[in-house]
Image (spheres, helix red, strand yellow):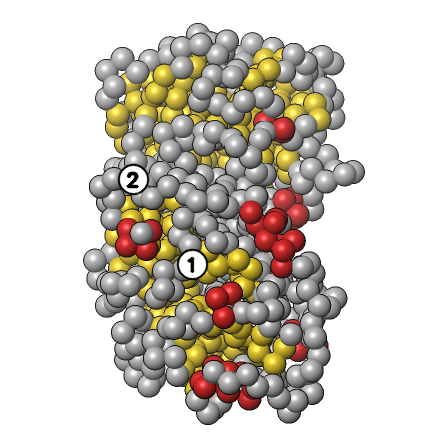
Amino acid sequence: MRTSFIAFLSLFLFGLAAESSSCPYAERKAKRNACPATSQDREARHVQSRASPPAPGKKGVFFHNRIAPGASSLYIANADGTNERLLLGNNTWSPDGEVRLISPLFSQIVEAALLRESSNHWLVFTSERNGDGNSDIWRVRSDGSGLEEVAAIPAVETAGSMSPNGSLVAYSGTLNNGKSNIWITNLTTGASWNVTNSTEVAGNSSLPDGHFRPAWSPDGEFIVFSSDKDTLWRGHNGSSGWEHTQETSIYTIRPDGTGYRKVANNSGYSLGSPKFSPDGSRIIYYEMSVENTFQARISFHADDVTNQIASVDYATGGDRLVHTSGDGVKIFPQYVTSDTIGYLRKGSGDPGTTQGLNYTSTAVGGNSTSDLSYSFVDGSFRSPSWSPNGTLVVYQVTTTDPIRPINKVLYSWQEDWEYRFLDVFPKLSNQGVIAYTNQQTGDASASVITMNPDGSNSQVAFVDLSNTTIVPEVSAVDGGFDAFQPDWSPDGKWISSGWGNTFQAHNKGPSAVVIYPSRSNNSVNGSAYTIVSNSSVLNSGFPSFSPDSKLLVYREFSLDGPLGLRILNLTDGSVRALMWGWDNTPGWSPDGSLIVFTRRTSLPNDGVYEDNYDVCTIRPDGSDYTVLTTSGANDAHAVWTNAGEILYSTGEFGFQDEASLYDDQFQPYAQIMKIAADGSNKTALTNGFWEDAMPLYVPNAAWS
């Protein structure tokens, strides 16, 4: 039920039960897409009834969101897809049964990326068995025996490749500087070294500078890998997109760091996952337009992407041959035999689409295979790797369902805090209750939920209405309808949030700022609301209460572009402009002296790829505007801690892998950073393979 702004002011300021018909929509009742009880039942599947308190010795819980597969397992099969079986069987570190039928009570193990089988039947793979979010290198024999750790530290280790003699493993790792480098571990001595950290190899540190997917030459003398060093931070869709694309080239180097040179590149394209031919004379790789490195990693775009598999002469980088044709995403190429190439055809998996293992001839054009025993194998596979003799293939099968349950323990990069999973835009009230938007855990809805930190007393505070039943001011134009950034009034009785197309389609679809009672102050089960933003403005959202409850800051956007930040006076209804520009996600500091927000600092666009976003602060009176971040990548989603520090997500460390290999990862490079209010004391709080964001500290006192 919607009430007018005037009626809301009476309720908010004086606690009077009043209604007003001064607004033409004041009496209109908005239907809900489901009753609150139904929404709450759906939510309960992802919320533990009562989670345990933080482990002894911890200061509390550090909640954050993670976009990553819910579970993943490795399978091994004949190259034609027959005789498929779990590589690790049902041992206690892997999920029980078929991954496609996995129970919500799944193990926290994520077998994230299988990579190579060497001649002695060892398989090297990536696993998060040491903690959700901390990817390490392991190896196991092809019969599932001999499981052992290869490289496991509190950083990313992934994309392992074993040398032909079985003594060394090369892999991508982020130890020391948070950026992906090529590392090697000696399996006999345990010694590890960084191959790409020399001045000859390292690129401009202010630009992308990652090195990925190493593969050994047949004689073990060289490694080839891909790298995005010295390229630009680029948004997709002609720079209008928030998420980055990636441009990579192919390089080679000796295991001791000498012999570094570029093997192949193609301006405007991303060349990835290089592998040697059996005789070492050629390098095969996939080639994809830079723009498509975003589309290929989003499932609902992947079926529209086309790229090809190519190879070049290793010694000269010339004699480029294209081995495939036709549409579709083609990645993970490998010489299965000297005249047959295997690769993954990635797709959405939707009915009528194609994805699976495919084979083609090494001949130009790829019109036929030389061995008819190799034929297309349909399936939702990822990261395939064929045995040296071409008879076996091992691959990864992932699932995003079940979603991580709220309060699931994650790997912790802060010794004093226990990391746990939570949905997006969490906020802790002064009374110790959490509000968040259930974008991941709410079956594609984006309603506002409140709960105690342990997950108990989960309640629907505001039901996201479907776009067919909503009042005209906020009718959605696409599927990006949401109720983002809930914020508590200081007394815990009210919650404000955006409502509509506040995130996607913000320059096309409507959105409003709404305030509604929290469940402790709500007799109508999540259906009462008041629109408090200007109805003549297309899109308003991301509100934040001042600590004294008198003001509300939010951002506005129109069809013609961004309008900046506005401050609403909740005592008299007046609105004033605080900032004009491309601003977003404002939040009031605990002491009320500053507002933190994200700004597109590159406006006006000076170049086609100028799309940088930074974390900024300003005083409520408009003075002391300060840009706190300096990375050329995107820095955003900033929030305050109760101690007056700022947490935000940053892309400054760049991609941890080739962008197009991810699935449904908009910003897989995002890491959580902490800074002081003046931008000093920068500290990374995550160092993982996935998109981590939306942090919230909840101290032990809130659990009592």
Residue 547 appears in the rendering: yes
Residue 201 appears in the rendering: no
Residue 293, image x and y in percent? 55, 46
Circles 1 and 2: CB distance less than 8 Å?
A: no
User: What secondary structure is found at the residue carrying circle 2?
Assistant: loop
Residue at the (74%, 26%) spot, across then down = 367
**Nearest the eye: 665 or 4:** 4
For the N terminus, which image quadrant? bottom right
Residue 633, image x and y in percent? 40, 57
Distance, label 1 to label 2, CA atoms, is: 20 Å
- For disc 1, the neighbor class at 10 Å (few under 14, some 14 to 19, many from 20) is many
Residue 16, image x and y in percent? 51, 85
- For disc 2, the neighbor class at 10 Å (few under 14, some 14 to 19, many from 20) is few
**Nearest the eye: 85 or 279:** 85
Check disc 1 and report the residue beneath it. 434
User: What secondary structure is found at the residue carrying circle 1?
Assistant: strand
Whether residue 308 is situated above or below residue 6 in the rendered picture = above
Q: Give the mark nearer the N terminus: 1 vs 2.
A: 2
**In which quarter of the view is residue 431 placed?**
bottom left
Amino acid under label 1? Ile
Q: Which mark is residue 677?
A: none
Give left or right: position of 293 versus 600: right
Q: Which mark is residue 55?
A: 2
**In which quarter of the view is residue 288 placed?**
top right
Residue at the (52%, 37%) spot, across then down = 70
**Nearest the eye: 251 or 546:** 546
**Nearest the eye: 380 or 340:** 380
In this view, the residue farthest toward the right is: 352
